[in-house]
Image: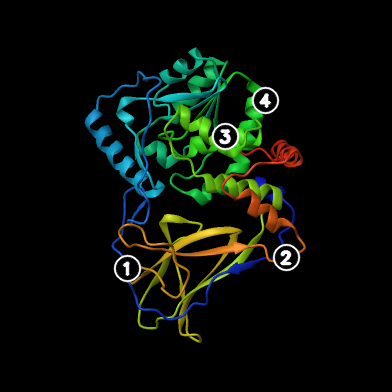
Amino acid sequence: MNCLQYLSSFRSYAVQIHGFKCNQRKSLPCSVNMMGGISSGDAPRSMAVKATSGSTSSAKKNDSESEGKKSEIYSHNMTEAMGAVLTYRHDLGMNYNFIRPDLIVGSCLQAPEDVDKLRKIGVKTIFCLQQDPDLEYFGVDIGAIQDYAKECGDIEHIRARIRDFDAFDLRMRLPAVVSNLYKAVNRNGGVTYIHCTAGLGRAPAVAMAYMFWVQGYKLSDAHTELLSKRSCFPKLEAIKNATADILTDLKKEVVTLTWPDKKCSAVEVSGLDIGWGQRMPLKFDEEQGSWTLKRELPEGRYEYKYIVDGEWTYNEYELVTTPNKDGHVNNFLTVVDSDPNSGYGAVRKRLTSDDPDLTKEERVKIRQFLESCPDEEE
């Protein structure tokens, strides 16, 4: 059972989106890279960050040139997807930073020997956010690492998978993931090591959510504390929306996308809740003479683009983002609560504002939610 199924029943709400009208196609040069990111020029690149090395693993690097090339590709994809210039060097080994005396954020373990390095600094829980493809890309033998940690007996290795470069999956997975983390910390004590692949996106976001939901931080204070210790780029909007999801219930609405062009042979959409590395096909409606897609989405703001006969484009008659420095834009839609009596709209608006904080009652509710959330199988 998914953790978010513990939220109350869904309620009705509206979609703020212009009507879909015919438009002139505007092609935007885009390319999907090897790791599923999109190179569209839409993401801002005003922040350059690089992980600092807190420790170097003794993992063998016989094929350093190959690892260096993979790191270069991964860093490029991460930069394109995350909207900041991010660099990860897998060939330099594990790196990390203490965010608090009991909380470390870092890059992935590469070999069983890295478990010993963490044990020496008091780590009792290794909290891995990587999916199997992440591990396979860099050739990490997660089974060997898990087996060695189990043999040690004084450290627990836990996996709680979140898709890389995907802010929506991060939002949807955060409640269950932080619940697992919360229970592990209570069970094991000591220092907790949270990591993804590079330790620059998913791991910092999970650490921030834990600090915000459990350790009493205001979100802006957790962000400041995190960045003062480690250069990284956590997706704040995902944390804000996940917070609101817990406190207002996970409400959804069916939205309909339409591309009214009879002459094209295939229409797809990318973005929305599936990320830029994936596409969903629209179906042609003979009666309406247009391409349509129905999709159920939780409250929030979603950007997307159409791919029409292989060309990336946007609809100028739908809502569009502000052009970036290259003049590129996306379409977007916003799903909001339309019930004036629910009170949830005001709560979500507050929790997704620039500087949200939690009331005492909200912190208690989140704590109760994390404690009651069903455990997930690794």
Question: Residue type at mark 1?
Answer: Gly
**Of marks 2 and 4, which one's residue comes earlier in the chain?**
4
What residue is pinned by disc 1? 310
- Real-space Cα separation, disc 2 to disc 1, in angstroms: 40 Å
Disc 3 to disc 1: CB gap under 8 Å: no
Front residue (pair 16, 27): 16
Residue located at (41% from left, 39% from top): 134
State whether residue 241 is above or below residue 102: below
- Answer few, some or many: residues within 10 Å of disc 1's Cα (few below 14, many 20 plus, some between 14 and 19): few
Q: Which residue is mark 4?
A: 186
Name the secondary structure under disc 1.
loop
Position of the C terminus by quadrant = top right
N-term mark: 2 or 3 = 3
List x then y, in percent, for residue 14: 64, 68
Q: Which mark is residue 221?
A: 3
Whether residue 353 sits left or right of residue 305 in the image: it is right
What residue sits 45% from the left and 24% below the top? 97
Identity of the amino acid at label 2?
Asp
Q: Are marks 2 and 4 in contact (CB under 8 Å)?
A: no
